[in-house]
Image: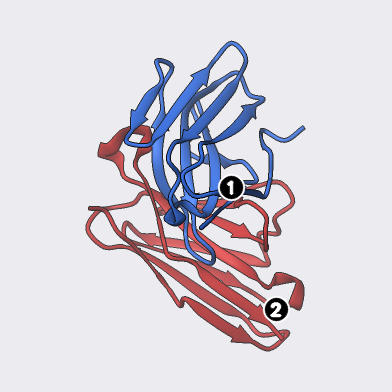
Amino acid sequence: RKEVEQDPGPFNVPEGATVAFNCTYSNSASQSFFWYRQDCRKEPKLLMSVYSSGNEDGRFTAQLNRASQYISLLIRDSKLSDSATYLCVVNVRGAQKLVFGQGTRLTINP
Amino acid sequence: GAVVSQHPSRVICKSGTSVKIECRSLDFQATTMFWYRQFPKKSLMLMATSNEGSKATYEQGVEKDKFLINHASLTLSTLTVTSAHPEDSSFYICSARVEDRGSGGYTFGSGTRLTVV
Protein backbone atom coordinates (compact mmCIF):
# COMPACT_ATOMS: atom_id res chain seq x y z
CA ARG A 1 0.00 0.00 0.00
CA LYS A 2 1.30 3.45 -0.88
CA GLU A 3 2.06 5.74 2.04
CA VAL A 4 0.07 8.58 0.48
CA GLU A 5 -2.71 7.89 -2.00
CA GLN A 6 -4.55 10.25 -4.26
CA ASP A 7 -6.94 9.93 -7.16
CA PRO A 8 -4.67 10.68 -10.14
CA GLY A 9 -7.50 12.17 -12.15
CA PRO A 10 -7.41 13.88 -14.53
CA PHE A 11 -10.10 16.29 -13.44
CA ASN A 12 -11.46 18.51 -16.21
CA VAL A 13 -13.85 21.15 -14.94
CA PRO A 14 -15.22 24.44 -16.27
CA GLU A 15 -13.98 27.75 -15.00
CA GLY A 16 -15.85 28.83 -11.92
CA ALA A 17 -16.59 25.31 -10.71
CA THR A 18 -15.76 23.95 -7.30
CA VAL A 19 -13.30 21.08 -7.19
CA ALA A 20 -12.49 18.72 -4.33
CA PHE A 21 -9.43 16.50 -3.99
CA ASN A 22 -9.00 13.71 -1.49
CA CYS A 23 -5.97 12.02 -0.07
CA THR A 24 -5.35 9.24 2.43
CA TYR A 25 -2.17 8.38 4.30
CA SER A 26 -1.23 5.10 5.88
CA ASN A 27 1.31 6.04 8.57
CA SER A 28 -0.42 6.99 11.80
CA ALA A 29 2.81 8.69 12.93
CA SER A 30 2.36 11.34 10.25
CA GLN A 31 2.45 14.73 11.88
CA SER A 32 2.55 17.41 9.19
CA PHE A 33 0.44 17.66 6.10
CA PHE A 34 0.62 19.84 3.03
CA TRP A 35 -0.80 20.46 -0.38
CA TYR A 36 1.74 21.33 -3.04
CA ARG A 37 1.09 22.50 -6.55
CA GLN A 38 3.25 21.46 -9.47
CA ASP A 39 3.08 22.98 -12.91
CA CYS A 40 4.27 21.02 -15.92
CA ARG A 41 8.04 20.54 -15.93
CA LYS A 42 8.46 22.70 -12.84
CA GLU A 43 9.32 22.06 -9.25
CA PRO A 44 6.52 21.64 -6.66
CA LYS A 45 5.54 24.71 -4.69
CA LEU A 46 3.81 24.81 -1.34
CA LEU A 47 0.15 25.71 -1.70
CA MET A 48 -0.81 25.39 1.94
CA SER A 49 -0.23 23.47 5.12
CA VAL A 50 -3.12 21.47 6.51
CA TYR A 51 -4.20 21.68 10.13
CA SER A 52 -6.61 19.59 12.17
CA SER A 53 -8.91 22.55 12.66
CA GLY A 54 -9.09 23.08 8.92
CA ASN A 55 -7.72 26.14 7.24
CA GLU A 56 -8.61 28.44 4.42
CA ASP A 57 -6.57 30.62 2.12
CA GLY A 58 -8.72 32.59 -0.24
CA ARG A 59 -10.47 30.16 -2.56
CA PHE A 60 -8.63 27.18 -1.11
CA THR A 61 -9.78 25.20 1.91
CA ALA A 62 -7.89 22.28 3.41
CA GLN A 63 -9.19 19.76 5.92
CA LEU A 64 -7.51 17.03 7.95
CA ASN A 65 -9.20 14.10 9.64
CA ARG A 66 -6.61 12.33 11.75
CA ALA A 67 -8.97 9.56 12.82
CA SER A 68 -9.65 8.60 9.22
CA GLN A 69 -6.15 9.57 8.04
CA TYR A 70 -7.75 11.65 5.34
CA ILE A 71 -6.86 15.03 3.86
CA SER A 72 -8.87 17.14 1.47
CA LEU A 73 -8.48 20.25 -0.63
CA LEU A 74 -11.37 22.32 -1.92
CA ILE A 75 -10.96 24.92 -4.63
CA ARG A 76 -13.84 27.32 -5.09
CA ASP A 77 -14.52 29.53 -8.10
CA SER A 78 -11.76 27.83 -10.05
CA LYS A 79 -9.61 29.89 -12.41
CA LEU A 80 -7.77 28.89 -15.56
CA SER A 81 -4.54 29.47 -13.66
CA ASP A 82 -5.48 26.74 -11.18
CA SER A 83 -4.68 24.13 -13.84
CA ALA A 84 -1.82 22.10 -12.39
CA THR A 85 -1.07 18.88 -10.58
CA TYR A 86 -1.90 18.95 -6.88
CA LEU A 87 0.28 16.87 -4.60
CA CYS A 88 -0.74 15.63 -1.18
CA VAL A 89 2.36 15.55 1.01
CA VAL A 90 3.02 14.14 4.46
CA ASN A 91 5.85 14.38 6.95
CA VAL A 92 6.25 11.58 9.47
CA ARG A 93 7.13 12.35 13.08
CA GLY A 94 10.84 11.99 13.64
CA ALA A 95 11.71 12.04 9.97
CA GLN A 96 12.74 15.07 8.01
CA LYS A 97 11.73 13.79 4.61
CA LEU A 98 8.47 14.49 2.83
CA VAL A 99 6.37 11.73 1.31
CA PHE A 100 4.47 12.69 -1.81
CA GLY A 101 1.25 11.33 -3.20
CA GLN A 102 1.12 10.61 -6.91
CA GLY A 103 -0.67 13.88 -7.58
CA THR A 104 -4.03 14.81 -9.06
CA ARG A 105 -4.01 16.56 -12.38
CA LEU A 106 -6.51 19.37 -12.74
CA THR A 107 -7.44 21.18 -15.93
CA ILE A 108 -9.75 24.17 -15.79
CA ASN A 109 -11.52 24.76 -19.09
CA PRO A 110 -12.71 28.18 -20.31
CA GLY B 1 13.07 33.92 1.15
CA ALA B 2 15.18 30.80 1.15
CA VAL B 3 16.28 29.79 -2.31
CA VAL B 4 17.83 26.60 -3.60
CA SER B 5 19.61 27.00 -6.90
CA GLN B 6 19.84 23.85 -9.03
CA HIS B 7 22.00 23.43 -12.12
CA PRO B 8 21.89 22.46 -14.86
CA SER B 9 18.20 22.81 -15.65
CA ARG B 10 18.49 20.50 -18.61
CA VAL B 11 21.15 18.10 -19.79
CA ILE B 12 21.46 15.58 -22.58
CA CYS B 13 24.21 13.04 -22.33
CA LYS B 14 25.35 9.89 -24.05
CA SER B 15 24.91 6.44 -22.54
CA GLY B 16 27.80 5.48 -20.35
CA THR B 17 28.80 8.98 -19.37
CA SER B 18 28.34 10.61 -15.98
CA VAL B 19 26.36 13.70 -15.16
CA LYS B 20 26.69 15.94 -12.12
CA ILE B 21 23.80 17.97 -10.77
CA GLU B 22 24.41 20.72 -8.23
CA CYS B 23 22.14 22.24 -5.64
CA ARG B 24 23.15 25.29 -3.68
CA SER B 25 21.35 26.98 -0.84
CA LEU B 26 21.81 30.67 -1.58
CA ASP B 27 20.86 32.46 1.61
CA PHE B 28 20.76 29.79 4.27
CA GLN B 29 22.72 26.81 5.45
CA ALA B 30 21.34 23.40 4.61
CA THR B 31 22.68 20.59 6.74
CA THR B 32 20.31 18.22 5.00
CA MET B 33 19.18 18.09 1.40
CA PHE B 34 16.85 15.67 -0.28
CA TRP B 35 17.15 14.30 -3.79
CA TYR B 36 14.02 13.24 -5.67
CA ARG B 37 13.38 11.70 -9.05
CA GLN B 38 10.18 12.13 -10.98
CA PHE B 39 9.15 10.14 -14.03
CA PRO B 40 6.52 11.53 -16.43
CA LYS B 41 3.07 11.71 -14.88
CA LYS B 42 4.38 10.19 -11.66
CA SER B 43 5.02 11.68 -8.28
CA LEU B 44 8.30 12.61 -6.70
CA MET B 45 10.16 9.64 -5.31
CA LEU B 46 12.78 10.29 -2.67
CA MET B 47 16.11 8.82 -3.73
CA ALA B 48 18.35 9.84 -0.88
CA THR B 49 18.91 12.22 1.98
CA SER B 50 22.15 14.14 1.79
CA ASN B 51 23.84 15.03 5.07
CA GLU B 52 26.60 17.62 5.32
CA GLY B 53 29.88 16.05 6.27
CA SER B 54 28.62 12.48 6.36
CA LYS B 55 27.34 9.75 4.10
CA ALA B 56 24.03 10.07 2.36
CA THR B 57 21.11 7.89 3.34
CA TYR B 58 19.64 6.08 0.36
CA GLU B 59 16.09 4.85 0.01
CA GLN B 60 15.44 1.21 -0.62
CA GLY B 61 16.12 0.21 -4.18
CA VAL B 62 18.35 3.17 -5.02
CA GLU B 63 21.89 2.17 -6.02
CA LYS B 64 24.34 4.28 -4.05
CA ASP B 65 27.20 3.46 -6.42
CA LYS B 66 25.20 4.68 -9.37
CA PHE B 67 23.82 7.84 -7.77
CA LEU B 68 26.74 9.41 -5.94
CA ILE B 69 25.87 12.13 -3.48
CA ASN B 70 28.33 14.56 -1.98
CA HIS B 71 27.43 17.19 0.58
CA ALA B 72 30.77 18.72 1.37
CA SER B 73 29.59 22.09 2.62
CA LEU B 74 26.55 23.62 4.25
CA THR B 75 25.50 25.22 0.99
CA LEU B 76 26.25 22.64 -1.66
CA SER B 77 25.04 19.14 -2.40
CA THR B 78 25.75 17.28 -5.63
CA LEU B 79 24.21 14.23 -7.28
CA THR B 80 26.26 12.41 -9.88
CA VAL B 81 24.53 9.91 -12.11
CA THR B 82 27.31 7.54 -13.11
CA SER B 83 27.36 5.44 -16.28
CA ALA B 84 24.01 6.85 -17.27
CA HIS B 85 21.57 4.78 -19.32
CA PRO B 86 18.36 5.77 -21.10
CA GLU B 87 16.28 4.46 -18.20
CA ASP B 88 17.93 7.08 -15.98
CA SER B 89 16.26 9.79 -18.04
CA SER B 90 14.06 11.63 -15.59
CA PHE B 91 13.42 14.89 -13.77
CA TYR B 92 15.70 15.21 -10.73
CA ILE B 93 14.82 17.71 -8.01
CA CYS B 94 16.61 18.66 -4.83
CA SER B 95 15.05 20.09 -1.72
CA ALA B 96 16.24 21.54 1.55
CA ARG B 97 14.53 22.17 4.81
CA VAL B 98 14.68 25.72 6.10
CA GLU B 99 15.06 25.23 9.82
CA ASP B 100 13.32 28.32 11.09
CA ARG B 101 10.10 27.72 9.19
CA GLY B 102 8.82 24.70 10.95
CA SER B 103 7.59 21.67 9.10
CA GLY B 104 6.31 23.73 6.19
CA GLY B 105 9.69 25.16 5.36
CA TYR B 106 10.87 22.95 2.53
CA THR B 107 12.22 24.71 -0.49
CA PHE B 108 12.87 23.04 -3.82
CA GLY B 109 15.37 23.54 -6.60
CA SER B 110 13.97 24.15 -10.06
CA GLY B 111 14.84 20.64 -11.18
CA THR B 112 17.12 19.06 -13.76
CA ARG B 113 15.70 17.28 -16.75
CA LEU B 114 18.13 14.56 -17.73
CA THR B 115 17.90 12.84 -21.09
CA VAL B 116 20.27 9.97 -21.79
CA VAL B 117 20.60 9.07 -25.45
Q: Amino acid at mark 2?
A: Ser
| Disc 2 secondary structure class | loop
Q: Nearer the viewer, residue B19 or A84?
A: A84
How far across and how far down the image is residue B4, in percent?
34, 60
Q: Residue at the spot x=52%, y=79% of the render?
A: B10
Residue B19, quarter of the rendered image: bottom right
For the residue pair A86 and A92, the one nearer the viewer reads as A86
- A51 with respect to A27 (left or right): left
Specify few, some or many for label 1: CA neighbours under 10 Å numbering under 14, 14-19, or 20 or more.
some
- x, y (%) of residue B102? 32, 33
Residue depicted at x 47% and y 53%: A44
Coordinates of residue A22 in the picture (x, y in percent): 60, 31
Colour red, chain: B
Please give the residue where the numbered disc 1 appears in the rendered image.
A13
Q: How far is the residue under mark 2 from the one under mark 1?
A: 44 Å
Tell me which amino acid carries mark 1.
Val
Read off the residue under disc 2.
B83
